[in-house]
C-alpha cells in the first residue's frame, strides 16, 4: 500500500465509528482506542529517529494537541465515574476490566454484557477519588484534585450533568441519589478567617 492509499484508508477508518455509533460494542471501542495508541506510538518512534528539527517541532505541536484532548477525557471520565457509581462495582468486575498492556485483543464482548455488577451495601471503595487512585495508580490527593478540577472546569459549565443521573439504570441512580451534588457546590466556600488575638493584628 502506498502512502496516499494509506492516508485515505486511515481517514475512512476515522469516520467509520461515527457512522456505526451504537452498533459498536464496548469491547470494539476499546480495541479501536488501543490501536490508535499503538499507531501514535509507532509514529512517534519514526519522528524521533528522523533527526529533522522541523519534523520534531511539528510533532511536538501534534503531541500537545493529543495531550489537551487526553486531559479533557481524563476530567470528563472522572465526572462520569462519579455519576455512574463506578466505585461500587464488584471485585470480580474490576478484575475482569484489567486489560493486559501487551494484549488488548483480550478484551471480549462478555465484559459489557448485561447490567454492571453493582455491590449492595458496603462498596470496595469509599468514593470515586479512592477508586481513581487505585485504578489509575495515582496518589489519593491527586485523584481527589482531578475530580475537583473536573467539577470546576466541566461540571460547572455543563448543566447537562445534572440530568445524567436520570439516564442511568436504576442501580446507578440509587447510588448517585445520596452522593451527587450540583456541580460547583463547594466553589462558594471560603477558607475560615484566622483567629484574632487581643492586642495583635494578624
Image (cartoon, helix red, strand yellow):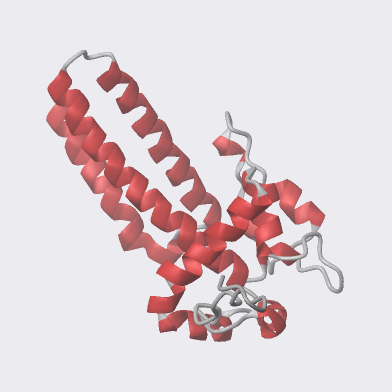
Determine which quarter of the picture holds residue 40. top left
The correct choice, above or below, for 73 with respect to 57 in the image is below
User: Along the line of sight, which residue is nearer the eye, 9 or 167?
Assistant: 167
Residue that protrudes farthest toward the right in the picture: 121
Residue 124, percent from left and from top? 81, 60
Residue 57, percent from left and from top? 19, 29
Total numbered circles: 0
Looking at the image, residue 66 sits to the left or right of residue 193; the answer is left
User: Along the line of sight, which residue is nearer the eye, 196 or 191?
Assistant: 196
Determine which quarter of the picture holds residue 185. bottom right
Residue 120, percent from left and from top? 84, 73
User: Along the line of sight, which residue is nearer the eye, 154 or 107?
Assistant: 154
Can you say which quadrant of the picture contains the N terminus? top left
Can you say which quadrant of the picture contains the C terminus? bottom right
Residue 101, percent from left and from top? 59, 32
User: Along the line of sight, which residue is nearer the eye, 28 or 120?
Assistant: 120
Asked if residue 108 shows in the view, the reply is: yes
Residue that protrudes farthest toward the front in the picture: 199
Residue drawn at x 30%, y 38% as measured from the top left: 63
Amino acid at each position: 500500500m502506498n502512502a496516499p492509499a494509506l492516508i485515505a484508508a486511515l481517514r475512512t477508518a476515522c469516520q467509520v465509528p461515527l457512522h456505526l455509533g451504537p452498533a459498536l460494542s464496548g469491547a470494539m471501542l476499546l480495541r479501536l482506542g488501543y490501536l490508535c495508541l499503538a499507531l501514535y506510538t509507532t509514529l512517534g518512534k519514526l519522528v524521533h529517529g528522523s533527526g529533522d528539527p522541523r519534523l520534531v517541532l511539528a510533532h511536538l505541536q501534534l503531541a500537545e494537541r493529543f495531550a489537551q484532548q487526553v486531559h479533557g477525557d481524563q476530567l470528563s471520565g472522572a465526572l462520569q465515574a462519579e455519576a455512574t457509581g463506578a466505585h461500587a462495582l464488584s471485585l470480580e468486575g474490576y478484575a475482569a476490566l484489567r486489560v493486559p498492556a501487551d494484549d488488548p485483543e483480550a478484551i471480549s464482548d462478555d465484559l459489557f454484557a448485561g447490567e454492571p455488577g453493582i455491590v449492595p451495601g458496603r462498596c470496595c471503595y469509599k468514593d470515586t477519588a479512592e477508586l481513581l487512585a487505585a485504578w489509575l495508580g495515582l496518589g489519593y490527593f491527586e485523584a481527589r484534585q482531578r475530580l475537583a478540577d473536573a467539577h470546576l472546569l466541566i461540571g460547572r459549565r455543563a448543566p447537562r450533568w445534572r440530568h445524567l443521573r436520570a439516564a442511568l439504570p436504576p442501580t446507578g441512580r440509587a447510588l448517585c441519589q445520596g452522593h451527587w451534588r450540583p456541580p460547583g457546590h463547594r466553589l462558594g466556600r471560603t477558607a475560615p478567617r484566622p483567629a484574632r488575638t487581643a492586642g495583635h493584628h494578624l
